[in-house]
Image (cartoon, rainbow, N blue to C red):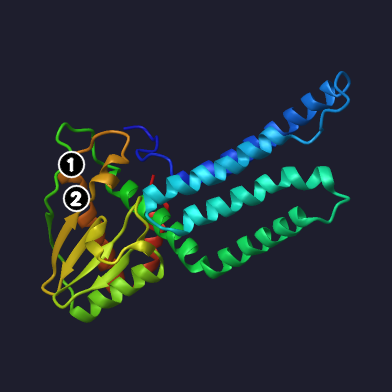
Amino acid sequence: MGYRSKIRMSIGWIYPIGIFTSYILLFLEFEIRKQLRHNFPGLEGLPYITIILVALMFIVLGIVQWFRYRNWIYPVLGILMGITTAQVSLIFPHYDDPGIVKLTYFISFIFIILFVLINWHSLYGHERFEINSRRLFRLASERIQKAENGFTARPYSGGRIDCTKDELIGFARFLHGNYIVRPFYYENYVCLSFSMNKSLMAINEGNEVSHVIIGNDGSVTVKVSERDYRDYRERLSFDKLCESLAGIFIRFMEYYKGGLESRIMVELKAAR
């Protein structure tokens, strides 16, 4: 299969695309208003329509991200950015008036900065986890062809890993430290969670999303969530996908045991 991303685009890409488009719309609306002012002298020159559209974009995307990632930070941030953006249309026509609108705009802007700083760990962690989860799924699907059999809810037994409990814990910590998985430690196994959808910063148990379970006895079990599987543009053999994911973690463990941790990052970043 020729290279074209097998996975649908992340919601995060809509922000730069939307902001770039807004610059074009701002320029066009400004020029249109400048031309119309010859016939309508009382017409304001500020591009109100584009400003309101950008404000709505932030709010709508924040809500969409809530439904996808289940992290309350995104709708709150989207609403704050939307309100602050909308206030721009009230400030510039009255730039000689140091009134309440300017004060509320300044307060909102400062509040956004504080909100981002306070929640930076969650925002940054989510972005890094999602990027590497996408790399894992791309890597797993590189050699899998389209197939008729699709998603099944059952876990997949993916073989065994030869490692000690200390090596397993060290491996999980390494993957976590590089934002590849979020590990959950249990008495008899470690659950390595990853997801292209629900935020790993918002889950309480590893089995809420796609995960690989590695037991203290070395057994490997794979479970891919339906939402992650549906993010593939084409239907892939589900068993082959799970088998490939199991093989990736077994191979990564061998790299870790051999002191070749850098190969894990190289392989992930090369995933197409």
Q: Give the x, y percent position of residue 195.
A: 32, 54
**Residue 132 image offset from top left, x and y in percent:** 39, 56
Q: Quadrant of the C terminus?
A: top left
Q: Choose between 92 and 213: the one closer to the eye.
A: 92
Q: Which disc is residue 12 wearing?
A: none
The structure residue drawn at horizontal position 69% and vertical position 62%, both measured from the top left corner, is 107
Between the C-alphas of marks 1 and 2, the distance is 10 Å
Q: Residue furthest top?
A: 39
Q: 179 or 250: nearer the eye?
A: 179
User: Which one is closest to the eye, mark 1 or mark 2?
Assistant: 1
Question: Residue 183: which quarter of the image?
Answer: bottom left
What percent of the width, then of the height, locates residue 139?
32, 49
Q: Does any portion of residue 59 appear in the rendered image?
A: yes
Q: Amino acid at mark 2?
A: Cys
At 49% across and 49% down in the image, what residue appears? 62
SS at mark 1? loop
Question: Looking at the picture, which amino acid does disc 1 mark?
Answer: Phe
Mark 1 nearby-residue class (10 Å; few <14, some 14–19, many ≥20): some
Q: Residue at x 35, y 72 (%)?
A: 174
Pointer 1 or 2: first along the chain: 1
Residue 96 in the figure: left or right of residue 73: right
Q: Residue furthest front?
A: 100
Q: Which residue is mark 2?
A: 242
Q: Secondary structure at mark 2?
A: helix
Q: Eyeballing the image, is 53 above or below 70?
A: above
Q: Is residue 198 above or below residue 21?
A: below
- Most foreground residue, 261 or 172: 172
Mark 1, residue position: 151
Residue 58 relative to residue 262: left or right: right
Bin the neighbour count of mark 2 within 10 Å (Cα to Cα): few under 14, some 14-19, many 20 and up. Answer: many
